[in-house]
Structure formats: structure tokens, C-alpha cells
């Protein structure tokens, strides 16, 4: 990687995240994230605390500040990291365990690299984005991408923009199957409600077109340590 790009992204052949399971993944500096994300900078982003936050993200963010990295600098670093990643046949790629693509140009660059990963024999790529208001769904190409939403109004707007949706909720209220959350149909994330299920075994979010056709949002109950959950709960309350 070039000196300007430097240490802005960490890509790993196999994630250490138990929820993700057997998948490759990327971690990107938060300079890649849109400022409209209410969970960013202490608002309840699960990636900002714990081992990921302290030992990975903090270093990525520090370097991004040092080099005054732009959205495209991070995207370029991520695309290069994906292209240089060892490929395990059939292993899916979770883009952005932390990070995002906050412009069409960034999404086009990173999604093209993800498609090359699949073409080399890797599995499907999937991700979630808070930048859905500013980035066209078409810019993500063949990546299965869900718009990260905090309110019912977000869900409706994201669907109008052609995105499948994921909705953060305070609680599933005991539901494990599809249920009504206000006016929105929500299917709780199976990795949160079923023992032994991971993203790589579930594959629900690998099929954003199917989620759109079935007309529900994938639900994600607030998670992380107690501090993160309290911050996220406050952010959701302020959005309501």
C-alpha cells in the first residue's frame, strides 16, 4: 500500500468474531463512515469498544487522522486489501465489520474488489451501510447490502431507494420469528436468537433481493457491552 494509504484497513482471511463465523472480513477506519450515522463517535457503535475497538479500530482511526485520510483513501486501501487477501474457496466475505462506503465512488471501488474476491473462488460478499441516503444501491453491484436503519421512517425511505433493510431495535420482546414492530415487519437475526447459528451458517443477509421480495427488515437487537448498549439505546430514543 502507498504511504498516503498506509494502515487504514485491516483485512483478515477468517474473522475472529463468533457471530460472523467462518468468513473473511475487513475492518476500515471510521473516516469511511458517514457523519449521519447516529451510532458513530460514542453513540453506541459496537465496534468502538472491546478488543475490536481498543486493538484494531483505535489504531486505524489514529492513522486516518494522521494522514488526513479521505473516504476514497480508505476505499482504495480496502480494495487493495481485498485483492491481496488469500482466498479460501467458498468462504464468504463480510465487508466492514467496522467501516462503510460513504460515497458512490467508494462503494463502486470496494464492491468491484469484493466481486473479484468471489471470482477467485471466494463466497458471497455481504455488508450493511449507514450511507444509504447518499449512495445508490447500484453502486454496490453484486454485494448483498442492507441499509442500516434506526427508525420505521428510515426503513420506508431506504426501501424507496431500492435497499433491503436492517433495523436496530431495543428488544425483540421475546419474538424469535417474524413479527410486527410498529408498522414494520421484522425478522430477528437468527444468530442472536438461535444457539449455534452464525452469519456464515445462516446466510440470511447474503440475499438482499430475497429480503426485499419477502418485505421484511432483518432485526438486530442492541448488542455490545453495557456502556455500548446504553449509548445505543439513548441514540435510538433520540431518533424516535
Image (cartoon, rainbow, N blue to C red):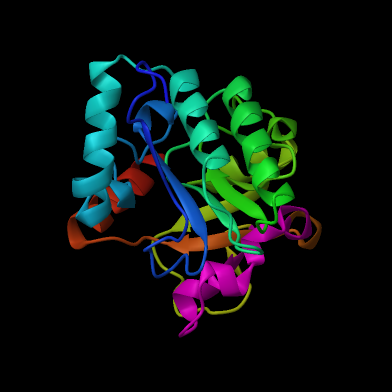
Q: Nearer the viewer, residue 30 or 131?
A: 30
Is residue 209 shown to the viewer in this render? yes
Compared to 112, does 91 lie above or below? below
102 relative to 33 in the view: left or right? right
For the N terminus, the quadrant is top left
Q: Is residue 205 magenta?
A: yes
Figure quadrant of residue 121 = bottom right
Q: Image point 51% across, 37% down: which residue? A: 130
184 relative to 189 in the view: left or right? right
140 relative to 59 in the view: left or right? right
Is residue 185 shown to the viewer in this render? no
Q: Image point 78% across, 63% down: which residue? A: 214
Q: What span is in magenta?
A: 184-211
Q: Image point 25% across, 26% down: which residue? A: 63
For the C terminus, the quadrant is top left
Instruction: Name the spot of residue 125 as percent of width and height, x first.
Output: 63, 51
Amino acid at each position: 500500500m502507498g504511504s498516503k494509504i498506509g494502515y487504514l484497513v485491516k483485512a483478515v482471511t477468517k474473522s475472529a468474531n463468533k457471530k460472523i463465523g467462518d468468513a473473511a472480513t475487513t475492518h476500515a477506519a471510521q473516516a469511511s463512515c458517514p457523519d449521519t450515522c447516529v451510532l458513530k463517535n460514542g453513540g453506541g457503535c459496537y465496534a468502538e469498544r472491546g478488543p475490536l475497538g481498543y486493538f484494531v479500530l483505535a489504531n486505524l482511526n489514529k492513522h486516518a487522522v494522521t494522514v488526513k485520510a479521505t473516504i476514497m483513501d480508505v476505499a482504495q486501501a480496502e480494495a487493495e486489501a481485498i485483492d491481496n487477501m488469500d482466498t479460501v474457496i467458498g468462504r464468504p466475505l463480510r465487508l466492514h465489520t467496522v467501516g462503510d462506503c460513504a460515497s458512490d465512488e467508494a462503494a463502486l471501488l470496494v464492491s468491484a474488489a469484493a466481486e473479484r474476491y468471489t471470482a477467485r473462488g471466494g463466497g458471497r460478499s455481504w455488508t450493511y451501510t449507514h450511507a444509504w441516503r447518499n449512495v445508490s444501491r447500484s453502486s454496490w453491484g453484486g454485494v448483498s447490502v442492507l441499509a442500516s436503519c434506526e427508525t420505521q421512517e428510515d426503513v420506508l425511505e431506504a426501501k424507496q431507494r431500492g435497499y433491503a433493510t436492517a433495523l436496530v431495535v431495543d428488544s425483540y420482546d421475546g419474538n424469535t420469528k417474524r413479527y410486527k414492530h410498529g408498522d414494520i415487519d421484522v425478522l430477528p437475526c437468527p444468530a442472536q436468537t438461535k444457539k449455534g447459528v452464525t452469519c456464515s451458517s445462516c446466510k440470511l443477509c447474503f440475499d438482499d433481493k430475497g429480503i426485499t421480495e419477502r418485505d421484511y427488515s432483518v432485526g438486530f437487537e442492541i448488542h455490545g457491552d453495557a456502556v455500548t448498549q446504553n449509548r445505543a439505546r439513548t441514540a435510538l430514543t433520540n431518533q424516535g
